Amino acid sequence: MSETLIQIFNCRKSFGSLEVLKDINFSVNKGDVVCLIGSSGSGKSTLLRCINRLEHIDSGQILVDGQDIYDQSVDLNKYRAKVGMVFQSFNLFSNLNVIDNCIIAQQKVLKRDKTEAHRIAMTYLKKVGMEDFAHAASTQISGGQKQRVAIARALCMNPDILLFDEPTSSLDPEMVQDVLDVMKDLANEGLTMIVVTHEMSFAKEVANKVVFMDKGVIAEEGNPQDIFTKPKNPRTQEFLKRIIR
Amino acid sequence: MKYLTITGNQFIDTCLSILITFWPSLLLGVKTVLLVAISGTIIGLVIGLIIGGLRAIKVEKGSILYIIKWVYDVLAKCYVEIFRGTPMMVQAVFIYYWLKPAFGWTPIVAGIFVISINTGAYMAEIIRAGIQSVDVGQTEAARSLGMTSIQTMMNIVLPQAIKNAFPAIGNEFIVNIKDSSVLNVISVTELFFQAKSIAGSLYKYEETFLVTAVVYLVLTIITSSILHIIEKRMNATKTSYPSSSTTSRMVKTQGGGK
């Protein structure tokens, strides 16, 4: 459980004159479920996107499996196939139906043949409880269903890590639990996950590490008990006071 | 030509006589119009997909590809500006005579060439706008799964872009049906060219061109209805799962049917 999967050293990132990430250092072990919390604009999502290289860090180093992911020799597409990403706005391919959403990258990136890709897609759709909707148009299902399909789509690539960028923030309240249940299952199976979230109960229950970010720095990190019951940093205390009523 | 007396109104009778007597040459004109407009739109669309599609691809700064892309962008912009910024009639005359010694082409081939590259300039912008209308999240999702930018473009972005741009693409086709008339300057025997000869031989300009206008109108109305049907089909939901956005439509079609 203690094998280090991701190490981030002195990571900086600016958008124009706005410094979003200021000297970020942290690491994730294999099997960890890390929750990134903090108010909007604190840099949580940007950090997540840097790990997937959807954004470029300005300086610093991100090692995944001991490999510098910003190194010239890294095959970006191969790397990304191993690091799944689930977005706040689902981003299902709207020109494809549910099953094809799960199949296309398997065929194009992993070069699996159609029947195998189909079989794997059905396995994961079953896992997230969406197998009955395999042939539904991806634009015609509800938000919670879309997000579960998006998770299945990411799982089809057999990723080493799954990154969640506020996966439940744009869902109706009653849909949130379905998605969180799926994520909980994955966590229990030992999948490494980094979750940007505002669901404090999820963080409390599932995470084994909570990272509180504030204005581009990691203000506090630790296990959920410590962070939620006896936060040391006054900014963490203030944030938690406002969010937990 | 013998003038008929059908309605008793001399003007209308002349129109009808022209239509009845000269329908073979009018039909020939219509065929040429359709040939030029259809092939021009299709070839133009292909040009637009290539030029507009490549323009939408983003290249990371600092590589040699970035410089190539920059040069390409400038050239593509020049192409679009030149062909959108000058009249097609001028383009037709210039290109036809300029390249005639080299290609030795007939007016019709030159006509299709001109209308194709002219349409291509418009299509490039239509496709580029279509691509920009596709949510950036679609690209991010595809890239995060490890798909290359070309795979993402071909499998995810372009299909959606074409669907979004379909009304504009169809509009180009209708414009081409009408604008093929300017090709009469290089003696392409399309509808306007035929009408001009008929009017000249009869010395009946008002009547001949009223008939011609009606023929053009029939062509464009039929075309736009067909395009409208295709557009509706494309937007039809491909699912039987009811949701809040489908039920109203399903209720309507089921309730009103049979």
Image (cartoon, rainbow, N blue to C red):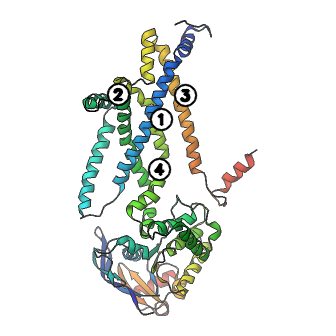
Q: Look at the image and tell me whether residue B168 can be seen.
A: yes
Q: Are marks 2 and 4 on the same chain?
A: yes
**Label 1 sits on residue:** B174
Badge 1: how crowded within 10 Å, few (<14), some, or many (20+)? Answer: many
CB atoms of marks 1 and 4 within 8 Å: no
Secondary structure at badge 2 equals: loop
**Label 2 sits on residue:** B106
Please tell me which of labels 2 and 4 falls first in the chain. Answer: 2
Please tell me which of labels 1 and 4 falls first in the chain. Answer: 4
- Relative to A218, say whether A2 is above or below: below
| Distance from the alpha carbon under mark 1 to that under mark 4 | 17 Å
**Label 3 sits on residue:** B218
| Distance from the alpha carbon under mark 3 to that under mark 4 | 27 Å
At 74% across and 49% down in the image, what residue appears?
Answer: B255
Q: Which mark is residue A1?
A: none
Q: Position of residue A30 (x, y in %)?
A: 44, 88
CB atoms of marks 2 and 4 within 8 Å: no
- Judge depth for marks 1 and 2 and give the one in front: 2
Q: Which mark is residue B162?
A: 4
CB atoms of marks 3 and 2 within 8 Å: no
**Chain holding disc 3:** B
Looking at numbered disc 2 in the image, what kind of residue is underneath it?
Thr
Q: Look at the image and tell me whether residue A168 can be seen.
A: no
Badge 2: how crowded within 10 Å, few (<14), some, or many (20+)? Answer: few
**Chain holding disc 2:** B
- Judge depth for marks 3 and 2 and give the one in front: 2
